[in-house]
Amino acid sequence: MKKLKMLYEGKAKKVYQTEKENLYIVDYKDDATAFNGLKKGSILGKGVINNKMTNIVFQYLAENGIENHFVEELSDRETLVKKVQIVPLEVIVRNIAAGSFSKKFGVEEGTPLKNPVLEFSYKNDALGDPMINEMQITAIGIATEKELETISKSALKINALMQKFFLEKEIILVDFKIEFGKYGDKIILADEVSPDTCRLWDANTKEKLDKDRFRRDLGGVEEAYQEVWRRIKE
Ligand code: ADP
Ligand code: UDP
């Protein structure tokens, strides 16, 4: 499958049309941004790791009943995916307090949460991806009540599956962001699952193995991505 017209260049990926009307190619870049694009940089080799890691996780999820956009890995950085109409929501699931949750509620980072927390942000760069609740989502028409129920149930199931997947690699899944898209009359998982979109801590040392190393200038950014990949590829 060949890349035709580039349809979209995002912060971390490019999306291309293909000869097939219902398929896209995503091409993962090394570019990294944080704080709504305010901090910019590059993480050498990130595109390759995020591409391959997403594909392994998506295949694991598919085997466990989570339908998603993965079709075929085409190269180190490129994957063929089902074309979906993205529901403009960042669906966030948290198991341990960190990041904006810790800041907002004054809960120390690393505090285990008594139940998984589901949150939504409205995917809108101009507005800075504001947090949004379910009634606001249905009121504006971002998703219907039924669609939102599908998304919520699926996100919590994905959380349970991914917690198990990562723990087998001695990694704690602290929190993550996923996106869903409309595919015909279904809603399926799309976009990516990577150290860009998950907080991943070493289960023994609690060392951060994700994009927080870039966001917070902790150093060892490339090494952290490589470490996650080393554990997953086995
Ligand atoms: P951003 O838009 O946040 O900068 P990326 O750089 O990752 O993010 O760009 C990839 C874009 O492709 C995102 O807007 C994402 O919602 C979209 N996308 C991901 N998977 C699919 C898909 N299967 N079909 C259509 N669009 C997709
Ligand atoms: N996240 C993401 N993209 C975003 C915002 C958040 O992938 O635009 C992920 C982030 O990596 C973390 C989770 O969602 O795993 C929760 O992020 P949080 O709300 O704590 O925001 P942050 O502290 O990253 O600003």
Image (cartoon, rainbow, N blue to C red):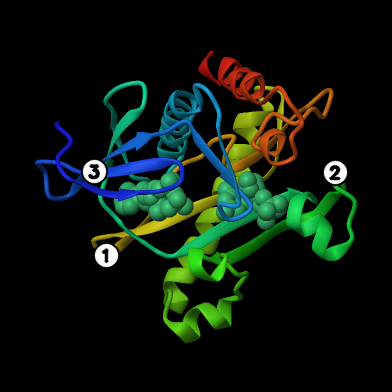
Q: Dot 1 corresponds to which residue?
A: 185
Asked which secondary structure carries label 3, the reply is: strand
Rounded to the nearest angstrom, the CA distance separating label 1 from label 2 is 39 Å
Q: Residues at badges 1 and 2 in contact (C-beta under 8 Å)?
A: no
**Badge count:** 3
- Which is more N-terminal, label 1 or label 3? 3
Identified by mark 3, the residue type is: Tyr
Q: x and y percent of residue 28 in the render?
A: 39, 34
Q: Dot 2 corresponds to which residue?
A: 110
In the displayed structure image, the side of residue 39 where residue 51 appears, left or right = left
Q: Which mark is residue 56?
A: none
Q: Is residue 140 visible?
A: yes
Identified by mark 1, the residue type is: Asp
Q: Dot 3 corresponds to which residue?
A: 16
Say which of 86 and 12 sits in front: 12
| Rendered residue at 59%/38% (across/down) | 162
Image quarter of the N terminus: top left
In the displayed structure image, the side of residue 189 where residue 178 appears, left or right = right
| Rendered residue at 65%/61% (across/down) | 118
